[in-house]
Image (cartoon, grey):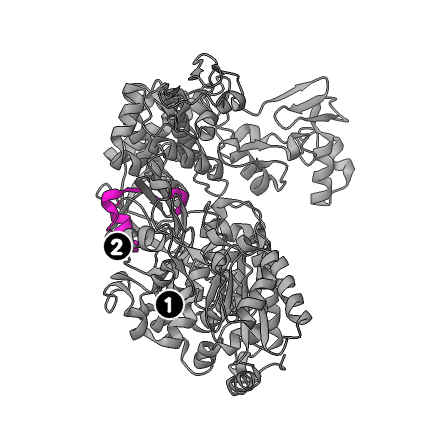
Amino acid sequence: MTESQSREVTFKVDGRSLRGRQGESLLEALRRYGYQVPSLCHHEAVSPYGACRLCLVEVQKGKRRKLTTSCNYPLMEGIEVFLDTEQVVSNRRVVLQLLLAQAPAAERVRQLAAEYGVNDTPFEVEDPENRCINCGLCARVCKEVVGVEAIGFSGRGAGKRMVAPYDETAEDCIGCGACVFVCPTDCIGMSETGGIRTIERWHRKLPLKTCSVCGRHFAPTFQLNKFAEWTGLPRGHFDKCPDCR
Amino acid sequence: MAKAFANSADLKAYRQQLLKTRRTETKTISICAGTGCCASGALKLVDGFHRAVRERGLEREVTVRQTGCHGFCERGPLVVLHPELTLYQRVKGADIAEIIERTIQGGEVVERLLYQDAAGHRFVREDELPFYKNQMRLILAQNGHIDPTSIDDYLAVGGYQALAKVLGKSKPEKVCETIRKSGLRGRGGGGFPAGVKWESCRAAPCPDGVRYIICNADEGDPGAFMDRSIMEGNPHSVIEGMIIGAWAIGFPGRPQGYVYIRNEYPLAVERLGIALEQARRLGLLGKNILGSGLDFDIKINKGGGAFVCGESTALMASIEGFVGEPRAKHIHTVESGLWDKPTNLNNVETWANVPLIIDKGVKWYTGIGTGDVSRDPWGGSKGTKIFALVGKVQNTGLVEVPMGTSLRRIIYDIGGGIPGGKKFKAVQTGGPSGGCLPADKLDLPVDFDALTAAGSMMGSGGMIVMDESTCMVDVARYFTHFLADESCGKCVSCREGLRQLGRILDRICAGEGRPGDLELLESLGRTIRSASLCALGQTATNPLDSTLRYFREEYREHVEDKKCRAGVCRALISFRILADKCTGCMICAKKCPEQAISGEKKKPHVIDQSKCIRCGICRDVCKFDAVVVE
């Protein structure tokens, strides 16, 4: 963190005076104070992206007041934030209608939409089974937290999709499941059968290591080899499961 | 070529020497070798003229020069004979001998190669043509005169004089101030005052002194080619502007330059590359430029073909090697841009304005255009603007006019009006995200603020003229699909919003419009505009908004009456043959791809509506105007 980011600033939310750190995500600051601001593409462990457009707020800075997403708005001294204005809510509702049309099978989208009184969409549904909303959280976690870049977006516009390279097997995927854990709409899919872990969406199948002590499958061998490589620990260290180590 | 200039005195001396040795008394054949004319055979003409001159032993009296785009692309390939300025248009290889023998040697004019207007009047001199006469060519001034691959040509017409005037002589802050006071605003579309941007970038904290100076040459608007023609025709003017910018913004730090250019512009890439190499050899790029202490060089970065990479933050992401997605600009790029360094990005045409302003001064420059910028750089629009005038207009091509020129003057006086006796319907300014303005806006002065107020925008300067055979709903549909395809796909509001907008418009054009559709379009449009992150999404609904605002009746007809008055939307029209006009020539029956037309020879024909696919070929081929759309 740079010096300027650790500086404390004062800002206002619906007239209430609050404090936060310069440059931190406005959304995170709001949530710290207990404000409910919806979002699907944000996670505090990774950098903000601003894709789902649900965390809209109005921000007044000097004379200018504008609608903006709060996740990627860096907190600044003296700004005034307005949370659920008519403009915020009406735009959020249209965004929810759009998300309902894109990912009608996503439970979390349906719930959130219902909270805003949006139970139906006036827009055409392309794939009734679809759950992915292109929030990109999986790829950000893979890159920023796991340190692997096994997946990424391909294409652009409405044809944009999150895929493994060439939509074939994600060869770099270590099968850690972080993407599955973080996905807000549960559209990646992970299963374990017969000593094999499968990350469905990335077409990745990885044999699991058997613990030399207790005999249970505990992690993909490929992943443990990577850990050995990254940490410099002897491979033998990873022969046992964390419980037996 | 000379050796590298150590200082501005060297440059001046070299220019003096150039002017002395140049044969000013010779006749010059200048051939437009812009992309358009090259496509219609200009390079063969260049070779042909060289050969013809050589064969006749005229090398001493006649110079053959290939130049950049002259702008009258409709009539290419163009050949201009200097010093008489005789303009020959649509010249072919077979005309070369005649031009040399009759005009160059005989002093006569070859009538059939002259430009002829709709009234049949022929024009001899280039500067007498209404297309050129009514323009004010400052940025394009040298395009028809210099060889873009020759730095000597540029130096001879006064090139790099502005650079010599400021480098090591004017304080960088003073140069920024000059640009601010000139009122120069960004020609790429945003219209942000360039001087204010320069000053902010200069003032941004930058411990290691690395500031990036970028030229945005990712001209992606369909039908727009202003920037391409500047780079193809006068690349040094852009480079000179950038070096002046590097001095003003980055000295005494370590400024570095980039030109981000579309890979689809091979000729511009090539000519810019040549120009950069020449500038390096003469010491105009590199270390200690003209002895001023400024170190600066420019790299070319070729774009991968995404429209959105014309957006500044997407462009910077692309240079860094990432996918071209825009990011939020709450922290401005002048503070943290390319590789998180202070970055100043201007468009090609903006950079090309810089030497001109330095050379001729603020007072002269602010004398051109609208408003008053003496106190506020947002107070007006100064200088000229180049437009790519295309569509349903007689003279398509590049038009440079003072800011504030009316649409009418551009479309009628310069563009020659609408061809085929048809009626003007609308003009779209500002490229795919621009708005469509109707006939009662023809007297609007074209500047940044007037266009925005009318629901359109300056954009980078595309100008598409539409006549009565254009369906405005179809226009909105077309541009919505274009932008949906070109959206980076990050924001839900833009990606899904434009996709759904396109679908609703598809439905309306297919005759499946429903009550409430117009309100749905409006509500969705509002969200796309206000909830999207970058300018692509924020301006994407301009075609929709402006057509709804000015041509709402046409939407209503599509939705309620299931009619398309322009005869464009196939589901809403039918073709019929007028029995009293049909001569029974049978050509329509022969050309119909579906064999939907029947009838005996010399008797009126009939279209079987159940077979007709409404392709309109019958109407196109009928010589008697017997086929009508209903």
Disc sitting over residue B74 in the figure = none
* Residue interval drawn in magenta: B431-454
Disc 1 to disc 2, C-alpha distance: 29 Å
Q: Give the total number of marks visible in the rendering.
A: 2
Q: Quadrant of residue B45?
A: bottom right
Residue A35 is at least partly visible in this image: no
Quadrant of the image occupied by residue B402: bottom left
- Determine whether A208 is above or below B88 in the image: above
Q: Position of residue B426 (x, y in %)?
A: 31, 41
1 or 2: tag closer to the N-terminus = 1
Q: Quadrant of the N terminus of chain B?
A: bottom right
Amino acid on which the number 1 mark rests in the picture: Glu
B284 vs A85: above or below: below
Instruction: Give me the residue at 33% from left, 36% from top.
Output: B468
User: Measured from the top left, where is residue B198 in percent x and y?
Assistant: 39, 66
Chain of the residue under the numbered disc 2 shown in the image: B
Residue B108 visible here: yes
Q: Is residue B178 above or below residue B122?
A: below
Q: Residues within 10 Å of mark 2 (few under 14, many from 20)?
A: some
Find residue A67 and report its image quarter.
top left
| Nearer-the-camera pick, B612 or A64 | B612
Query: Chain under label 1?
Result: B
Question: Is B432 colored magenta in this rendering?
Answer: yes
Q: Secondary structure at mark 2?
A: loop
Confirm whether circles 1 and 2 share one chain.
yes
Disc sitting over residue B199 in the figure:
1
Q: Which circle marks residue B445 in the picture?
A: 2
Q: Amino acid at mark 2?
A: Pro
Which of the pair B608/B280 is nearer the observer?
Answer: B608
Please give left or right for residue B12 compared with residue B185 in the image.
Answer: right
